[in-house]
Amino acid sequence: MFDILMYLFENYIHSESEVYVEQSELTDELIRAGFNRAEIYKALDWLEQLADLQHCDELPYLNVKPVQSVRIFTDSECEKLDVTCRGFLLFLEQINVIDSETREMVIDRLFALDKAYIGLEDLKWVVLMVLFNVPGKEQAYAQMEDLLFDEPTGLLH
């Protein structure tokens, strides 16, 4: 499913081509690209649920704007997200790329993936997808895009 999300993001969203495509046409294209129909439906559902998170009153953590808080990860979150991933989420909050609301959206979408373990690169892509889908986060999206695609040059001290 994650490969399909990456394919869609790179070919439709990140490329800035026309974003609106009929679901049946998109499904047919993904099948021609070699993806499994069941996985395609899971990926499309994942994207739909991401869009729904913006308008969700059922998830109270998305409506709370704490002044300052510390996120304590559950045991299951620690199993899926290693210390590097958790540290990266904290880093993104500290540099104001994400806030507590988008962090929780990212965690929600990570746990909706069919993966037992999430690597740092996968996490970065999910953050990028979430930021792209949240209105008003254009600057944060650009910052995250820089973090994802800009390779450091020169000596690192």
Image: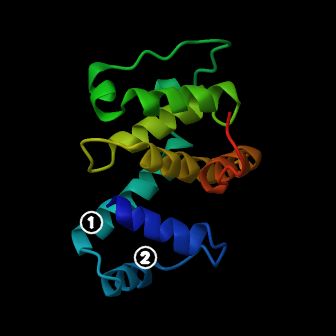
Q: Residue at x 57, y 36 (%)?
A: 102
Side of 142 where 118 appears, left or right: left
Residue 125 vs 15, above or below: the answer is: above
Q: Which mark is residue 23?
A: 2
Picture quadrant of residue 48: bottom left
- Image coordinates for residue 106, horizontal then vertical, percent: 48, 39
Image quadrant in which the N terminus is located: bottom left
Give 100 or 144, whichever is nearer the viewer: 144
- Image coordinates for residue 63, horizontal then vertical, percent: 57, 26
- Image coordinates for residue 105, horizontal then vertical, percent: 50, 38
Q: Which mark is residue 18?
A: none
Give 82 or 105, whichever is nearer the viewer: 82
CB of mark 1 within 8 Å of CB of mark 2? no
Q: Secondary structure at mark 2?
A: helix
Image quadrant in which the C terminus is located: top right
- Image coordinates for residue 118, horizontal then vertical, percent: 35, 42
Q: Determine crowd level at label 1: few under 14, some 14-19, many 20+ residues with C-alpha closer than 10 A.
A: some
Camera sees residue 62 = no
Going by the numbered disc 2, the residue's amino acid type is: Gln
Q: CA distance from mark 1 to mark 2?
A: 14 Å
Side of 92 where 51 appears, left or right: left
Picture quadrant of residue 156: top right
Q: Which residue is mark 1?
A: 39
Mark 1 vs mark 2, foreground winner is: 1
Residue 49 vs 81, above or below: the answer is: below
Q: Residue at x 39, y 42 (%)?
A: 110
Q: Secondary structure at mark 1?
A: helix
Q: Residue at x 50, y 24 (%)?
A: 61
Q: How is the image coloured?
A: rainbow
Going by the numbered disc 1, the residue's amino acid type is: Glu
